[in-house]
Amino acid sequence: MRIEVLKPGAQTQAQDLGRYGYQSLGVPVCGVMDEWSHRLANLLAGNARDEATLEIVLTGPTLRFEAATRIAICGADLSPRLDGRPLRPDRATDVPAGAVLEFGPCVAGLRAYLAVHGGFDLPLLMGSRSTYVRGGFGGLEGRALRKGDVLRAPDLAPPPPARGPRSHPLLPSSLPRDEPGAPAWLRAMPGEHWDLFDAETQAEFAHAVYRISPQSDRMGYRLEGPPLRRQEPGELVSEAMNFGTVQVPTDGQPIVLMAERHGTGGYPKIAHVISVDLPRLAQLAPQQTLRFEIVTLEAAQTLYLQREQALATLRDALL
């Protein structure tokens, strides 16, 4: 099935769960910024969790579907419309042949994820269909969508009408639910180098309001706020970096590493944003503010298991 790109949107890329096992060669993991919305969209569309979705940032594309299929859009509310009819996010939608999907103003969040039944037919490169624009590979020719591109999906028979709920009221959302204008709360665990900072600096990190710098991207979010100072200066041995690692460079302004993070780094790791809050972070835009709440490993594990159980409940209901 052909899906024609009538308008590309601001920055629309094919992404999946990432390209693992090649960081030692300098190849970043990449993958989706908001894994939760990606997984939910694939589930609602009837796909496996690792099928590629379109990661749509702020301004969405306009797409024409050649054949009937099913889609799901999760994450940010970018005012999607199908043949002019508004669509609700976080729902499965049956699309007739020839239909046009377009997006309007951004209502909430930053990144939306579009899944199509059967997944997008893109080549695997190092086990992934993720786009890495800096490297110029993966996804669709290693770049964001352009006008006139044609995406393809498997020629599958139209899926039967969706049975059971198309969403679930207990599923958590990746969109921040804080009061408008208030800082978003992100939970984090103390990092390996937490004790390199004195008690006053630790308290500052846990209570300060940080603003996301315009110099933020899929590699890392630079934060602007009270500088964090180590008790004693000195060089550290480079160590592995993860999605959500909070590094503190010499200027004291924290950097949260994101999907296209580098493999190793030598800055102190003061904290790690817990996995269930990474999607919330991915939905924040430059100039928005956030605060950290320090939690234990046990609390992070409990929250993760609760989220996975909610998704399993929806999966069972859709069968």
Image: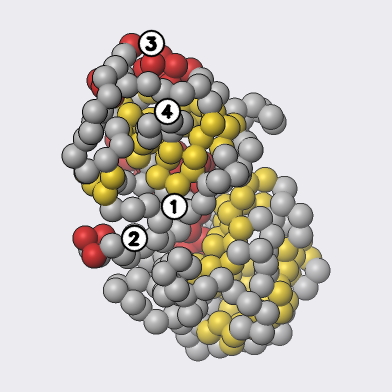
The residue where tag 1 is placed is 219
Residue nearest the viewer, comparing 163 with 219 = 219
Q: Depth-wise, is mark 1 or mark 4 nearer the camera?
A: 4
Seen as rendered, the residue at the extreme right is 84
The image's mark for residue 28 is 2
Separation (CA) of disc 2 from disc 4: 25 Å
The residue where tag 3 is placed is 200
Asked whether residue 36 appears in the rendered view, the answer is: no
Q: Pick the quarter of the image with the N terminus.
A: bottom right
Residue 1 vertical placement versus 8 (above, below) = below
Q: Contact, CB < 8 Å: mark 2 with mark 3?
A: no
Q: Depth-wise, is mark 2 or mark 4 nearer the camera?
A: 4
Percent of width and height locating residue 129: 40, 73
Q: Secondary structure at mark 4?
A: loop
How many labels were placed on the picture?
A: 4
Q: Secondary structure at mark 1?
A: loop
Percent of width and height locating residue 87: 71, 60
Which image quadrant for residue 204? top left
Percent of width and height locating residue 214: 60, 44
Separation (CA) of disc 3 from disc 1: 29 Å
